[in-house]
Image (spheres, grey):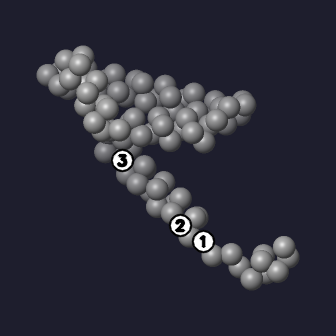
Amino acid sequence: MNRWLQKWIVRFGLESRPRLRRFLIGTIGFSIVLIGLVMIVLPGPAFIILPLGLAILASEFAWARRVWRRGQILVLRVRRKPVSRAAAETR
């Protein structure tokens, strides 16, 4: 995703305007995150939209990178979680 973002930054000439770039990426990222939050209540693929918005924000903001990494760690822990014997016996 980083190469894709770099291509668009160069295409629109935003490499020479870091404040404008940060504002635009922040606005787009927060908008997508808000749409994802609304989709939690309303029908829609919130579990796809929220990480997408957070990934966009993580390309520009350090706090979003930390949240993104913590989310990745959480997903890895959940995937590697062993099934308890009691849960396996009830199947």
Q: Quadrant of the N terminus?
A: top left
Residue 7: percent from left, percent from top: 26, 27
Q: Residue at x 46, y 56 (%)?
A: 72
Q: Which mark is nearer the camera, 3 or 1?
A: 1
As shown in the figure, which amino acid type bears the numbered disc 1?
Lys
Q: In percent of the image, x 72 and y 31: which residue is there?
A: 43
Q: Amino acid at mark 2?
A: Arg
Compute the Cα span from label 3 to label 1: 24 Å
- Measured as percent of width and height from the top left, residue 41 is found at 71, 34
- Residue 83, given in percent of the width and then of the height, sits at 68, 75
Secondary structure of the residue carrying numbered label 1: loop
Note whether 54 is above or below 19 in the view shown.
Answer: below
Where residue 75 appears, as percent x and y from the top left, is 53, 59
**Farthest residue, direction top:** 12
What's the residue type where badge 3 is placed? Arg
Query: Does the CB distance between marks 2 and 1 fall below 8 Å?
Result: yes
The answer to the question of whether label 2 and label 3 lie on touching residues, with beta carbons closer than 8 A, is no
Quick one: which residue is furthest to the left in this view? 16
83 with respect to 23 (left or right) = right
- Identity of the residue furthest to the bottom in this view: 85
Q: Quadrant of residue 16?
A: top left
Q: Is residue 14 above or below residue 39?
A: above
* Element under disc 3: helix
Mark 3 in CB contact with mark 1 (< 8 angstroms): no
Residue 15 seen in this snapshot: yes
Which of the 4 image quarters holds residue 24? top left
Q: Is residue 58 left or right of residue 73?
A: left
Q: Earlier in the sequence, mark 2 or mark 3?
A: 3
Of the numbered discs in the image, which one, if any, rests on residue 77? Answer: 2
Q: Which residue is mark 3?
A: 65
Measure the C-alpha gap from mark 2 to mark 1. 6 Å
Image position of 3 (left or right of 26): left
